[in-house]
Image (cartoon, rainbow, N blue to C red):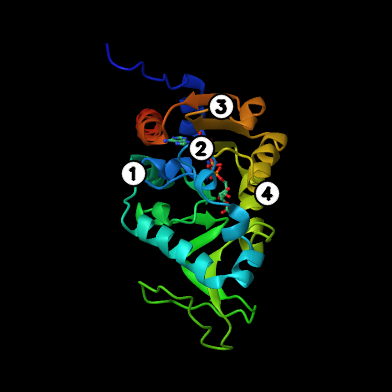
Amino acid sequence: MGDPVTPLPAGLVGRLATARRVVALTGAGVSAESGVPTFREAQTGLWARFRPEELATPEAFAADPRTVWAWYEWRRDLVAAAAPNPGHHALAQFESLVPGFTLITQNVDGLHARAGSRRVIEFHGNLFTNRCFAGCGAEADVPRPCPEPPRCPHCGAWMRPGVVWFGEAIPIEALQAAKAAVDRCEMLLVIGTSALVTPAAGLALRAHEAGAMVAEINISPTGLDGVAQFRLAGPSGELLPRLVEAVRARREMHS
Ligand code: OAD
């Protein structure tokens, strides 16, 4: 006998087949099957091996820019060598299937865009962008590999990775766009996130309170179990392609 296959709830497929505005909120779990480590999983998560306060805060960068920069270079190498997996591709297909589909990702790896998703809100920034640490506002491309933190071409301060660190605010455009999409959506898919980090996790609660249906795809239970009407237990790289195919078939039946 093969592994039991998680059934796709008919109510979920039916709702996705008729919905006009759907939002997907993704986290590190979506990229796990591409070989990109998650953060909080007990043995393999980055925060099991590294201390976030030494690598992912403005204070850490100010104290030791070289170490922090080198850690981000290591992560860039890892992601550059990875490829989008079937879960990323399925989410890109959702965009062509559902007219008002918005993808909000906490991931900084850029794999959704590499899979073909176009409407992506990068809530925590992007590993491959850089901006001035002194706040002169400059953003600059940095040729890779770049073992040492580069200097800002405008003011000469250190350049830092363009990601959101602990204690920092979400970029205002991303926050506003995400809230607007969530407030309008009929359905929110929460995929591969532990939903422990706010304000991203708060988006799920916000959607639920605004009357949207919430569905969760995750290999493990999360704190969202109370708000999710549907819970699909399993890897997103397997479940999302099945879900998109079921929704496509149902949409074709209706058209
Ligand atoms: P976490 O590491 O906290 O959670 C990853 C989630 O993915 C867990 O709930 C796993 O059960 C699930 N998971 C793992 N593999 C999966 C798979 N193949 N299919 C489906 N689910 C899977 O990562 P995030 O929730 O993304 O922030 O973490 C949120 C934020 O915390 C990150 O964006 C990062 C981190 O600190 C910043 O760097 C600002």
Circle nearer the viewer, 2 or 4: 2
* Pointer 1 or 2: first along the chain: 2
Residue 199 disc label? 4
* Pointer 1 or 3: first along the chain: 1
Residue 233 disc label? none
Residue drawn at x 63%, y 82% is 136
Residues marked 2 and 4 touching at CB (< 8 Å) = no
> Taking the image as drawn, is residue 94 in sight?
no
In three-dimensional space, the C-alpha distance between marks 1 and 4, rounded to whole angstroms, equals: 26 Å
The amino acid at mark 3 is: Pro
Residues marked 1 and 2 touching at CB (< 8 Å) = no
- The residue indicated by pointer 1 is 85
Q: Position of residue 22 (x, y in %)?
A: 53, 41
Residues marked 1 and 3 touching at CB (< 8 Å) = no
- The residue indicated by pointer 2 is 41
Q: Is mark 2 within 8 Å of ligand 1?
A: yes
Residue drawn at x 47%, y 46% is 99
Q: Quadrant of residue 204?
A: top right
188 shown above or below 79 = above
Q: Quadrant of residue 212?
A: top right
Residue at far right of view: 209
Residue 221 disc label? 3
Q: Is mark 4 within 8 Å of ligand 1?
A: no
Circle nearer the viewer, 1 or 2: 2
Q: Secondary structure at mark 3?
A: loop
Dot 3 alpha-carbon crowd within 10 angstroms: few under 14, some 14 to 19, many 20 or more: few
Q: Compare residues 237 and 194 and report the one nearer the observer.
A: 194
Dot 2 alpha-carbon crowd within 10 angstroms: few under 14, some 14 to 19, many 20 or more: few
> Taking the image as drawn, is residue 217 in sight?
yes
Residue drawn at x 57%, y 36% is 187
The amino acid at mark 1 is: Asn
